Image (spheres, rainbow, N blue to C red):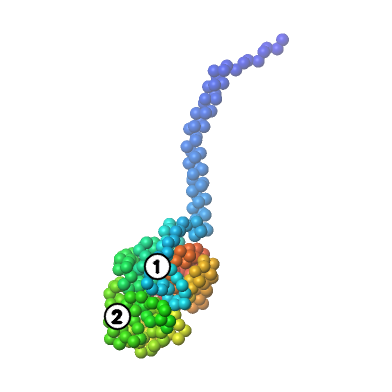
Amino acid sequence: MNPSPKKRSPQKARSRKKSRTEKFIRLLPSILLLLLLAFSLCAAGYVIFFRTVVAGEIPLDIASNTSSYTFGSNEGSSQQESRVHSVHQPVLAAAQRNLPKVAIIIDDMGYDEAIGKELLNFPIELTYSFLPFAPHTRKLERLAHRAGKTVFLHLPLEPKDSTFNPGPGALYLHDSPETQREKLAKCLQEVPHAVGINNHMGSAFTEDRLAMANIMEVIKERSLLFVDSYTTPGTVGLQTARQVAVESFGRSIFLDNEVDEEKICRQFEKLVSHAEKNGRAIGIGHPHKTTLNAVLRCGEHYSTRVEYVGLTKVLR
């Protein structure tokens, strides 16, 4: 008869099983570390190579407020002050330093503290143009200055349509030259860190050569910059500025005449194309939820084609 096979001792089987388990437990930290390293490398590669910022996933909330004057440099548009609460990821700076330059002015700053603070932390470089005598202008423009941002005075000037109210401190054609200069000086006191001026409304005022020449003398004396918002095709702002050797530039594109995200993005594309053709461009927008969403999304999309800068770097 053949000898019967030896039966394994249950105790020895348990011992072997226990040994394999102990080896696996000892190797587990190393396995997890390798998996974590692989995941980190994949995530880093994704961020570096794709530079993805998904604006649609950023939470935003808006609440409208009313005021006694009409917001927006485009006098024909109906715009409301907006409050935005958001969490932004910083937009990566363009690696190339010879890209066309784009400056984006946000007009009508000073009437909403919350949105003002939000804008000061916006991931794309902006220029902040403050309305004089707005309730939060002094505080916000001081914060902007401390943060190294470019600050402008959004100077209210007389519109052609008297139903539009340019707001406190506005300069009118019926004012004497002395009164116009005094008003401008008081507006500048409200925005003491302004390095330049762009007009709020002013379709009537900016077509008047004598009035514009008068305030250009003040702008020159204070070594300020001037940006013509182009609220009328008949403006003589740039002509009078250049006649007295004031550094000046004209607005290239209004981004949000129509407050619709896709339309703003199309305007943004025009702004980028203008910069690529001319080496620089200036866009103007307003503190609307829709505008901020569009600028964030489209701004990131075009960040490899243009460099976003403060206005001083466009003009100088």
| Position in image of residue 217 (x %, y %) | 31, 85
Alpha-carbon span between mark 1 and mark 2: 25 Å
> In the rendered image of this protein, does residue 274 appear above or below residue 45?
below
| Position in image of residue 179 (x %, y %) | 28, 84
> In the rendered image of this protein, does residue 63 appear above or below residue 179?
above
Q: Residue at x 41, y 73 (%)?
A: 70
Q: Quadrant of the N terminus?
A: top right
Tell me if label 1 and label 2 are in contact, CB under 8 Å: no
Q: Residue at x 42, y 79 (%)?
A: 163
Q: Quadrant of residue 161?
A: bottom left
Mark 2 or mark 1, which is nearer the start of the sequence? 1
Q: Quadrant of the C terminus?
A: bottom left
Q: Secondary structure at mark 2?
A: helix
Which residue occupies the extreme top position in the image?
Answer: 1
Q: Which residue is mark 1?
A: 66
| Position in image of residue 258 (x %, y %) | 50, 71
Front residue of this view, candidates 171 and 314: 171
Which label number is shown at residue 188? none
Q: Is residue 21 visible?
A: yes
Q: Residue at x 35, y 73 (%)?
A: 131
Q: Residue at x 34, y 79 (%)?
A: 170
Q: Which residue is mark 2?
A: 183
Q: Quadrant of residue 97?
A: bottom left
Mark 2: amino acid: Lys
Q: Secondary structure at mark 1?
A: loop
